């Protein structure tokens, strides 16, 4: 077999030597990987009567999600800007293998992306919760997705603790006060802001019946309908984020 | 005493205001003035309805600020009327008195509230100032907690069930979805908020037995009405709407002080007085806007005002009588639940909505069969200061 | 900080009022004596409040209105996990809220 020829006009072909070097470099730049059990999808019946499918996102869906998230990084309302900016970076890091053991769950209503949550494993027993971004407000999508995230850490990833911070007072009220979460201020959360609160297995199971709902398995047509991920209309999304009530709680 | 008519109405979008409190009120006032088409006539007085301006928006002398912003000085006089959540109807009452007495001809009544300048904790705190300082407030009593205790008694005494409360929310959300200016325009379903597997999560407790969808949102918004003597009203383009009657009554501030805490005495008396002045009866009313800050209040008020017997309001709701196509549509605009509750403004927006209904201009949520008589209840505090209004089409 | 919560007993006709008004509701008198609110009563209605104002870091508080045997009604916090309307309760005074860093005393009702 003759070695591939480097053709300046046609584009980039790498010699096998260069390929091997880049692979080694990449391997160095990539983090080590822990095995992660998948999250079994569930269906949540929302107040409006619509059903939201909560399922894991895959790395190929990141580009679609980034297109939806990016405009929100300019929305100075309810901390959408910082959550969107950070989530953008985290998902991009997930796609390019520059963040360890990250996962991402999405909420999909009628095939359209309605919310995103993500986090990662610090180690086998400890998890770090990253972000919760709601694209369709007024239906507690964020609340359901955050609970799904905690369900994933504790029940499917088999962890003992999840470290959590909130950027927004809404998040603080929903998580720190409602679960309630314990303080674990000795742990600096890697988002670099306030010190961490923690959800333990114990607290999770006590709060579970109250806060974690949804039905499994998802009917096959419903689940199939959540692929491929469709982007919400930008203008409609921005308008309802700005105008809809965020819960008084 | 002259008869007083509404000759112009205006309202901003309710929800999260893009504008400052003052600008919202100017927009609503301008809309009302344009709606009336007053030409060269001068506005003699402005009554502003607002509850939180001095605390939440750091504005004192709000009515004077409005007069300034709208270049109405030096001729136009003004006052700000504060009566808790009943500020709106109280301001209309004072406007009406000014015109009826002959002191003023054209009077603008403008309500406005911008709650989002403070966060939600502050907003709840601020509204809890309506409760009795040492008998209620120090215990963390909030209006939802008073409504929760009231609802529990109602359920035990009259057999009201959680699904009845949910029905009010569903009906009002359905109506709000048709109202372009409403705050909440997402219809909700019984499965989604009460009976489905995820209902408790979608619709969590606020003050048992009241849940999230039983309580109105915290909204920003402004509305305005232009009042004129009935004689002058004939010169204006639109069908005038007569303020046929207004009534007001008070009750104890602390709910425990009331001999029967399920009785909303002030609502009953205010309604009786309003009907007496209008020389009409509850059966004459074709459309009503009742103060449903909590879904239970729509039911309780519909009984106290005389539309249904005490304890039967929820049965009428079940029969569909209070829907837009029913015998007595209540809150066709979505009510406080879906249209929104900019606290000081609500009384004015209720009258605006009724005027639109009586004129036939309500669009998608128009009550059929050309309603002639409308009725509103504006409920201050937890029923300790209530204003009722009866409106009639034509002068 | 007062450690009792007081009803007002009219010096003229003896009627108890709580909260205190300027005039006695029965005889229009203006002189009152303080009478501590204590003893047992019947729970008229109650609620668990989840949407709380400033200064609260708990998930919910339980509040109720009680008809006391001594002849007044009072609103207070309930120190009862599963309240039932009509149950007998006993009043005591304790810290019910923190306002601007200061503890505020008020009525707390426990099961009998």
Image (cartoon, coloured by chain):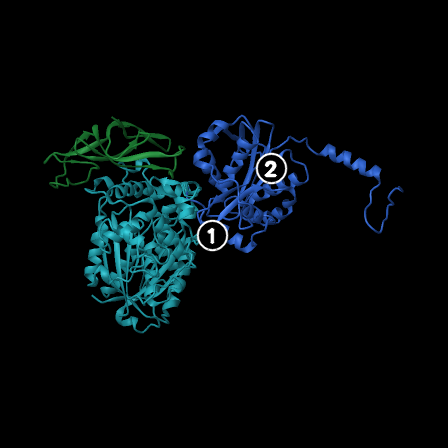
Q: Which of the image's four quarters has the C terminus of chain C?
A: top left
- Residue most extreme to the bottom: B235
Badge 1: residue crowd in 10 Å (few <14, some 14–19, many ≥20) = some
- Residue located at (34% from left, 67% from top): B359
Closer to the camera in the image, B122 or C91: C91
Q: Name the residue under label 1.
A: A243
In percent of width and height, residue A179 lies at: 45, 33
Chain letter belonging to callout 2: A
CB atoms of marks 1 and 2 within 8 Å: no
Residue B336 in view here: yes
Q: In this view, does A126 lie above or below B304?
A: above
Q: In this view, does B122 lie above or below B78?
A: above
In percent of width and height, residue A180 lies at: 45, 32
Q: Is mark 2 on a helix, strand or loop?
A: strand
Of the numbered discs 1 and 2, the one sitting upstream in the chain is 2
Q: Which chain is green?
A: C
Q: Which chain is blue?
A: A
Please count the marks in the image.
Answer: 2
Q: The cyan chain is which one?
A: B
In percent of width and height, residue A89 lies at: 63, 41
In percent of width and height, residue A82 lies at: 56, 42
Q: Mark 2 points at which residue?
A: A103
- Residue located at (34% from left, 40% from top): B207
> Left or right of B21: which side holds B228?
left
């Amino acid at each position: 077999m003759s070695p591939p020829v480097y053709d300046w006009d046609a584009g980039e072909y790498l010699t096998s030597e260069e390929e091997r070097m880049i692979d080694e470099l990449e391997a160095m730049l990539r983090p080590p990987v822990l095995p992660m059990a998948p999250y079994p999808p569930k269906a949540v019946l929302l107040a409006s009567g619509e059903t939201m499918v909560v399922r894991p996102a895959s790395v190929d869906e990141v580009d679609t999600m980034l297109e939806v998230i990016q405009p929100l990084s300019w929305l100075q309302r309810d901390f959408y800007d910082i959550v969107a900016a950070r989530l953008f970076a985290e998902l991009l890091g997930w796609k390019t293998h520059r963040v360890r053991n990250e996962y991402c769950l999405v909420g999909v209503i009628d095939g359209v992306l309605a919310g995103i949550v993500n986090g990662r494993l610090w180690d086998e027993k400890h998890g770090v919760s990253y972000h919760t971004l709601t694209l369709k407000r007024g239906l507690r999508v964020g609340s359901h997705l955050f609970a799904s995230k905690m369900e994933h850490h504790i029940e499917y990833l088999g962890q003992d603790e999840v470290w959590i911070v909130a950027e927004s007072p809404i998040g603080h009220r929903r998580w720190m006060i409602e679960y309630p979460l314990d303080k674990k201020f000795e742990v600096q959360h890697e988002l670099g802001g306030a010190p961490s609160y923690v959800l333990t297995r114990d607290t999770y199971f006590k709060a579970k019946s109250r806060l974690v709902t949804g039905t499994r398995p998802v009917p096959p047509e419903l689940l199939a309908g959540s692929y491929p991920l469709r982007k919400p209309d930008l203008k409609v999304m921005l308008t309802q984020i700005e105008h809809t009530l965020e819960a008084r709680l | 005493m002259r008869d007083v008519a509404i000759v112009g109405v205006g309202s901003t979008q309710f929800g999260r205001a893009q504008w400052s409190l003052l600008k919202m009120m100017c927009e609503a006032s301008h809309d009302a003035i344009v709606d009336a088409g007053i030409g060269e006539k001068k506005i003699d007085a402005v009554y502003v309805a607002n509850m939180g301006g001095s605390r939440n928006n750091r504005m004192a002398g709000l009515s004077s600020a409005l007069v300034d912003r709208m270049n109405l000085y030096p001729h136009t006089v003004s006052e700000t009327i504060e009566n808790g959540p009943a500020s709106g109807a109280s301001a209309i009452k004072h406007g009406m008195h000014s015109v009826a007495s002959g002191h003023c001809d054209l009077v603008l009544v403008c309500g406005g509230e911008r709650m989002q300048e403070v966060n939600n904790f502050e907003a709840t705190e601020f509204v809890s100032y309506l409760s009795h300082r040492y008998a209620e407030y120090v215990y963390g009593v909030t209006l939802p907690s008073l409504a929760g205790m009231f609802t529990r008694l109602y359920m035990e005494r009259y057999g009201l069930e959680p699904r009845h409360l949910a029905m009010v929310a569903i009906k009002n959300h359905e109506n709000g979805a048709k109202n372009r200016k409403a705050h909440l325009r997402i219809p909700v379903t019984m499965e989604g908020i009460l009976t489905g597997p995820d209902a408790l999560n979608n619709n969590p407790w606020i003050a048992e037995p009241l849940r999230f969808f039983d309580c109105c949102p915290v909204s920003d918004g402004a509305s305005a009405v232009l009042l004129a003597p009935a004689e002058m009203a004939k010169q204006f383009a639109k069908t005038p709407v007569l303020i046929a009657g207004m009534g007001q009554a008070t009750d104890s501030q602390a709910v425990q002080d009331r001999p029967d805490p399920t009785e909303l005495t002030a609502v009953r008396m205010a309604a009786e007085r309003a009907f007496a002045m209008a020389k009409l009866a509850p059966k004459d009313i074709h459309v009503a806007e009742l103060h449903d800050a909590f879904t239970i209040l729509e039911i309780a008020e519909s009984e106290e005002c005389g539309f249904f017997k005490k304890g039967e309001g929820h049965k009428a709701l079940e029969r569909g009588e209070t829907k837009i196509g029913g015998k007595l549509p209540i809150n066709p605009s979505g009510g406080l639940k879906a249209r929104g509750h900019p606290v000081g403004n609500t009384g004015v927006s209720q009258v605006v909505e009724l005027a639109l209904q009586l004129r036939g201009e309500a669009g998608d949520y128009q009550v059929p069969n050309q309603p002639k008589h409308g009725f509103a209840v504006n409920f201050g505090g937890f029923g300790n200061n209530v204003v009722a209004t009866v409106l009639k089409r034509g002068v | 900080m007062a450690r009792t919560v007081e009803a007002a007993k009219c010096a003229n006709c003896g009627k108890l009022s709580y909260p205190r008004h300027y005039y006695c509701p029965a005889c229009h008198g203006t002189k009152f004596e303080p009478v501590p609110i204590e003893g047992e009563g019947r729970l008229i209605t109650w609620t668990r409040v989840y949407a709380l104002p400033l200064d609260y870091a708990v998930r919910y508080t339980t509040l109720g209105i009680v008809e006391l045997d001594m002849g007044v009604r009072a609103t207070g916090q309930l120190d009862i996990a599963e309240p039932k309307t009509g149950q007998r309760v006993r009043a005591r005074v304790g810290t019910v809220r923190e306002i601007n860093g200061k503890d505020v005393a008020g009525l707390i009702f426990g099961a009998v």
